Image (cartoon, rainbow, N blue to C red):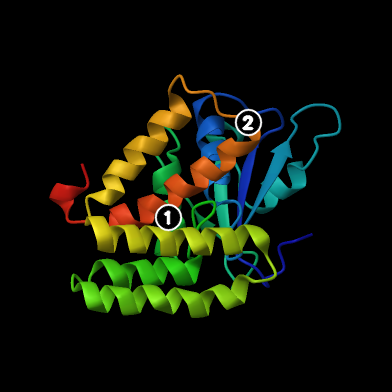
Amino acid sequence: QIVDGSKNILVKFDKKYAYGDNENAWKDFASNYGGGSDLLLAEVGISEYGENTNSELGDKYSINKDDYPQYRLFLVGKEVNEPLKYEYSDKVESDTLAQFVRKNGIYLALNGCLKDFDELVDKFMTNKDKSNRDKIGNEGKKLLVNYSTNEDEEKSGKYYMKVMAKINKDGDEYVNKEIKRLDNLLNGETYIADEKKPWFRKRLNILSVFKEKLPDDDKK
């Protein structure tokens, strides 16, 4: 029993062995956002046969088997018997599911991203003066102290700072160029060992935070 009002939890209710586009969208969502500290993800597989596994939970939260999958968002400090329902029409979309979560006040970090560095990116990208950008980038050094005991997070923090330095040197266009370069390496014919691929994806996620702050005409 992890739903007790002490954590933000998004629960997927579905048939026990789910598959198809909706399941793939959930897996994409979990891959992108499942590592954040502000939201836990959980699944409840409901069996219609045999022992009717978890059917009582389905009944408790008004889950209709004809509407699988269904999602319920339990918020910190809110009544656990009245979770928020994610509404969708034909199929589940990872992005719209993320929007639903964000609209209810929960920060979602892409895998590899850090909340305070994401906030620093916003400050950095909206200030076009190079000297000010240098000062903002240097603020990252103070933030890094918070991650000195976590090797992966410290590595991410240092990458944010590297990107800021490159942008200040080469201009905002560095963001799209680097995204294209990494994407071509990751998805092209160049061999990349499986153990190195997660770091490629994390870097692309961090770069996407910078890209989001570019003017619309520069995002392409």
Residue that appears at 43% across and 54% down: 206
**Number of the label disc, if any, that sits on residue 36:** none
Residue marked by disc 1: 100
User: Which of the two residues, 169 or 179, is positioned nearer the viewer here?
Assistant: 169
Label 2 Cα neighbours within 10 Å, binned few <14 / some 14-19 / many ≥20 = few
Say which quarter of the image contains residue 30.
top right
Label 2 is placed on what type of residue?
Asp
Residue that appears at 21% across and 57% down: 171
Q: How many marks?
A: 2
User: Which of the two residues, 18 or 26, is positioned nearer the viewer here?
Assistant: 26
Residue marked by disc 2: 194
Q: Is residue 36 left or right of residue 163?
A: right
Residue that appears at 49% across and 76% down: 141
Say which quarter of the image contains residue 118.
bottom left
Residue that appears at 48% across and 67% down: 115
Going from N to C along the chain, the mark reached first, 1 or 2, is 1
Does residue 37 sit above or below 77 in this rendering? above
Residue 87 visible? no
